[in-house]
Image: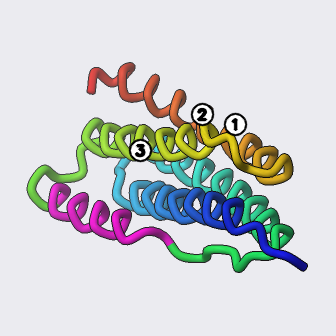
């Protein structure tokens, strides 16, 4: 089997960023004192895990080794978020605002990959499918943030 390096690199970038997103949602669910929001965050984490699983299958089908760890930048963001929580507390508005900021970053990563014209049809289809989850999550968290006045 030949490897399509461009597809593997692009999809693995999306996988790593989605893994950061899953971690962020799970951490936020554990940190927030609002059960309805915790449930929403956990549901979004599960949905993102499904997207990761599908993208990992696409990487394997392209002959690559699927990413199974987040990004260094995501790790740095979590350290900053922990420091911020120590200073600001676990205010729901602040947590939702941080999640929405992460969603903006994730959305940008997907838009960059999808704007590239050199993905194979199979890789583009896998990325497009995951993009639907990302866009829905971004829009949901953005609306939630604005409804809270954050």
Mark 2 or mark 3: name the one nearer the start of the chain. 3
From this viewpoint, which residue is outermost toward the right? 1
Residue corresponding to mark 3:
105
Q: Residue 64 in the image: state x and y as whole percent.
A: 74, 76
Residue corresponding to mark 2:
135
Q: Quadrant of residue 84?
A: bottom left
Q: In this image, 7 relative to 67: left or right?
A: right
Label 3 element class: helix
Q: What segment is highlighted magenta in the picture?
A: 70-85
Label pair 1/3, CB-CB below 8 angstroms: no
Give the residue at x 16% y 63%: 83
**55 versus 135 height, above or below:** below
Say if the magenta span includes residue 79.
Answer: yes
Q: Nearer the viewer, residue 124 or 18?
A: 124
Q: Residue 46 in the image: state x and y as whole percent.
A: 65, 56
Q: Main secondary structure of the magenta part?
A: helix
Label 2 element class: helix
Q: Residues within 10 Å of mark 3 (few under 14, many from 20)?
A: some
Label pair 2/1, CB-CB below 8 angstroms: yes
Label 1 element class: helix
Say if the magenta span includes residue 20.
Answer: no
Q: Nearer the viewer, residue 76 or 82?
A: 76
Location of the N terminus by quadrant is: bottom right
Residue corresponding to mark 1:
132
Mark 1 or mark 3: name the one nearer the start of the chain. 3
């Amino acid at each position: 089997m030949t490897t399509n390096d461009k597809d593997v690199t692009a999809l693995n970038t999306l996988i790593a960023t989605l893994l950061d997103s899953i971690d962020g949602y799970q951490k936020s669910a554990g940190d927030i004192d609002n059960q309805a929001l915790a449930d929403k965050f956990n549901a979004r984490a599960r949905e993102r895990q499904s997207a990761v699983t599908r993208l990992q299958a696409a990487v394997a089908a392209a002959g690559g080794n699927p990413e199974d760890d987040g990004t260094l930048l995501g790790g740095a963001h979590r350290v900053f978020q922990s420091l911020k929580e120590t200073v600001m507390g676990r205010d729901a508005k602040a947590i939702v605002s941080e999640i929405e900021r992460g969603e903006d970053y994730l959305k940008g990563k997907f838009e960059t990959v999808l704007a590239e014209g050199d993905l194979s049809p199979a890789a583009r289809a896998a990325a497009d499918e995951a993009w639907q989850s990302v866009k829905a999550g971004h829009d949901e968290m953005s609306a939630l943030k604005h409804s809270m006045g954050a």
